[in-house]
Image (tube, helix red, strand yellow):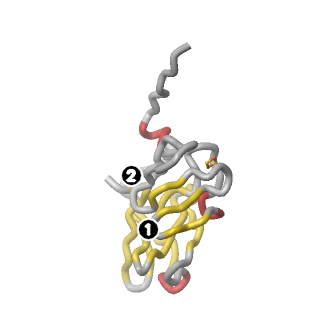
């Protein structure tokens, strides 16, 4: 039988809870909790999110691997990439894009806002 690609619903592919409202801005941490090179798992509207400080740039993606739901915060970071601890898929922390198999779907990425030493997350457009 020939191989056929699986067509994913974009909302499902990003592991985005259907119940979450759009345009939420939520405080999740203080900047001094996440120094350069550090990571932190935070809660955004009931979803676990991986927040990373890459050379002073704060980046956030869903903490659930799109392959089999492993926690990406337990993975290995290298620059703007994080490798899933279970089967080794690599994701781009800037976009959530899956860069290597076995993951083929992206994970959701979030906008990080810095205001007065506080970090806020928002959904990206
Ligand atoms: S659970 Fe992440 S690569 Fe399989």
In this figure, which residue is indicated by the disc labeled 2?
22
- Residue 119: image location, x then y, percent: 44, 75
Dot 1: what SS? strand
Q: How many marks?
A: 2
**Location of residue 5 with respect to 101 vertically, above or below:** above
Name the disc covering residue 73, or none: none
Residue 56 in the image: above or below residue 25: below
Nearer-N-terminus badge (2/1): 2
Location of residue 6 with respect to 64 vertically, above or below: above
Nearest the eye: 112 or 73: 73
SS category of the residue bearing label 2: loop
Q: CA distance from mark 2 to mark 1?
A: 19 Å
Residue lying at the far top in this picture: please name it.
Answer: 1
Q: Position of residue 50 (x, y in %)?
A: 54, 64
Q: Is the distance from the Cβ of mark 1 to the nearest ligand 1 atom less than 8 Å?
A: no
Residue 15 at x, y percent in the picture: 52, 45
Which residue in the structure is indicated by mark 1?
59
Question: Mark 2: few, some, or many residues within 10 Å (few <14, many ≥20)?
Answer: few
Residue 16 seen by the camera = yes
Asked where in the image residue 94 lies, by quadrant, the reply is bottom left
Compared across the picture, whether 30 is left or right of 123 comes to: right
The residue furthest left is: 125
Q: Are marks 2 and 1 in contact (CB under 8 Å)?
A: no
Residue in the image at 56% along x and 13% along y: 1
Task: Write the residue at 43% across / 66% down.
Answer: 121
Is residue 46 among what the camera can see? no
Residue at figure coordinates x 37%, y 72% from the top left = 113
Other residues around mark 1 within 10 Å, as few (<14) / some (14–19) / many (≥20): many
- Give the number of the mark in front: 2 or 1: 1
Q: Residue 74, image x and y in percent? A: 65, 63
């Amino acid at each position: 039988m020939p191989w056929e690609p699986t067509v994913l619903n974009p909302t499902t592919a990003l592991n985005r809870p259907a119940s979450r409202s759009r345009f939420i801005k939520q405080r999740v941490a203080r900047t001094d909790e996440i120094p350069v090179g550090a990571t932190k798992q935070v809660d955004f509207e009931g979803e676990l999110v991986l927040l990373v400080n890459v050379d002073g740039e704060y980046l956030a993606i869903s903490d659930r691997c799109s392959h089999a739901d492993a926690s990406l915060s337990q993975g290995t970071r290298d620059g703007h990439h994080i490798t899933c601890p279970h089967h080794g898929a690599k994701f781009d922390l800037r976009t959530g894009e899956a860069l290597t198999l076995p993951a083929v779907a992206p994970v959701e990425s979030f906008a990080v806002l810095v205001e007065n030493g506080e970090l806020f997350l928002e959904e990206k457009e």
